[in-house]
Image: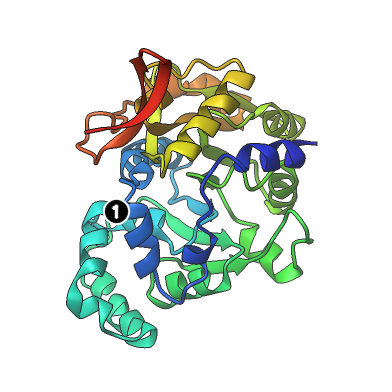
């Protein structure tokens, strides 16, 4: 089963469960920021291009469901002239660290309300973390939020009602934690065939999910020739175990994960007529983030005793 395969691969990754269950995103930005987390920022221009193409095709403002939305960061950087890096610095300020979660939510509601909304879509969030979804809706980043574990439970009638008008489903890191089971329940609830934007770490297989999409009339395209940096590996163990997973899948990490960084592919699934009218290669131009300055990362270097892991400055 895909879930068992994902579980095995996830054993190679560092566990950050604690940062997603806090009442506000300060720990989220602190922990992931220290690992040069950048997928939100490098994905945003691509998401904007795809949403623009979708809006042009339908002449309406799309409704987006962000699967694994956590604290609504994808919606925040899309809707407002903000970046993950800039928000990280905001939450690292001494004054912000000193306030209570309730005070911070009030501050953040005013903070986000002060920016012009430049978004091309309306955002709904789905996550297993009630505190994260509550924060994102209360501060006004998400229009609506759904708390559900669709790997293990059914979609409630109220959640199905919220999802019904969705035009686009997106995720920037949840595949590997969710499988075709979640996407099947979401697609069963939508009234139209949505576009599905997936940024997927290269070590996670996508075939079973693509097959589920195909059964519902969606074709899948993978953007060729480019990958998207997610973050640095946290330690030597995560680095080596991830390379082992890539080797087991016969994926060459040279110049990518071998340089100490997680890399993701961009995959777009949608109705065949839409894909024929505007191929993915025609609507997306990218900058992957590989040229961004980052902290020392884990790499292999040659020694007299063979390859060894070291931190490269």
The quarter of the image holding the C terminus is: top left
Q: Is residue 149 left or right of residue 300?
A: right
Task: Count the numbered circles shown.
Answer: 1
Residue drawn 50% across the image and 57% down it? 16
* Residue 26 visible, this angle: yes
The quarter of the image holding the N terminus is: top right
Q: Quadrant of residue 261?
A: top left
Query: Where is 282 relative to 79, above or below?
Result: above
* Residue 284 visible, this angle: no
- For mark 1, give the secondary structure: helix
Q: What percent of the width, then of the height, locates residue 87? A: 26, 61
Q: How is the image coloured?
A: rainbow
Q: What percent of the width, then of the height, locates residue 242? A: 53, 32
Q: Quadrant of residue 211?
A: top right
Q: What percent of the width, then of the height, locates residue 307? A: 41, 18
Q: What percent of the width, then of the height, locates residue 281? A: 42, 19
Residue drawn 67% across the image and 66% down it? 159
Q: Nearer the viewer, residue 212 or 153?
A: 153
Query: Where is 173 relative to 29, above or below?
Result: above
Query: Where is 300 relative to 194, above or below?
Result: above
Residue to which mark 1 is pinned: 84
Residue drawn 57% across the image and 25% down it? 244
Residue drawn 59% across the image and 27% down it? 245
Q: Is residue 81 left or right of residue 249?
A: left
Q: Quadrant of residue 232?
A: top left
Q: Nearer the viewer, residue 237 or 188?
A: 237
Query: Where is 24 relative to 286, above or below?
Result: below
Q: Nearer the viewer, residue 67 or 307?
A: 307
Residue located farthest toward the front when viewing the structure as drawn: 304
Category of crowding for the residue at label 1, using alpha-carbon neighbours closer than 10 angstroms: few (below 14), some (14–19), many (at least 20): many
């Amino acid at each position: 089963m895909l879930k068992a395969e994902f579980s095995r691969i996830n054993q190679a990754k560092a566990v950050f469960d604690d940062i997603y269950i806090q009442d506000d995103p300060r720990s989220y930005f602190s922990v992931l920021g220290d690992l040069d987390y950048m997928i939100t920022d490098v994905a945003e221009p691509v998401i904007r291009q795809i949403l623009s193409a979708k809006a042009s095709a339908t002449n309406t403002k799309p409704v987006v469901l962000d699967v694994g939305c956590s604290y609504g960061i994808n919606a925040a950087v899309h809707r407002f002239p903000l970046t993950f890096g800039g928000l990280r610095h905001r939450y690292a300020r001494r004054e912000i660290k000193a306030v209570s979660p309730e005070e911070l939510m009030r501050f953040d509601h005013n903070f986000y309300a002060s920016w012009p909304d430049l978004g091309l879509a309306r955002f709904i969030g789905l996550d297993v973390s009630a505190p994260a979804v509550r924060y994102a809706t209360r501060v006004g980043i998400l229009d609506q939020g759904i708390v559900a574990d669709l790997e293990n439970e059914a979609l409630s009638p109220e959640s199905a009602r919220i999802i019904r008008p969705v035009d686009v489903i997106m995720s920037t890191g949840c595949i590997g934690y969710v499988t075709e089971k979640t996407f099947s329940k979401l697609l069963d609830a939508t009234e139209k065939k949505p576009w599905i934007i997936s940024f997927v770490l290269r070590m996670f297989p996508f075939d079973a999910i693509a097959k589920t999409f195909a059964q519902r009339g969606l074709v899948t395209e993978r953007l060729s020739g480019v990958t998207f940096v997610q973050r640095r590996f946290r330690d030597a163990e995560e680095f080596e175990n991830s390379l082992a997973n890539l080797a087991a899948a016969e994926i060459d990490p040279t110049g990518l994960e071998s340089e100490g960084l997680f890399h993701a592919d961009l995959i777009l699934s949608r109705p065949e007529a839409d894909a024929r009218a505007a191929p993915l290669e025609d609507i997306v131009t990218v900058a992957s983030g590989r040229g961004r300055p980052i902290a020392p990362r884990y790499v292999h270097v040659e020694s007299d005793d063979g390859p060894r892991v070291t931190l490269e400055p």
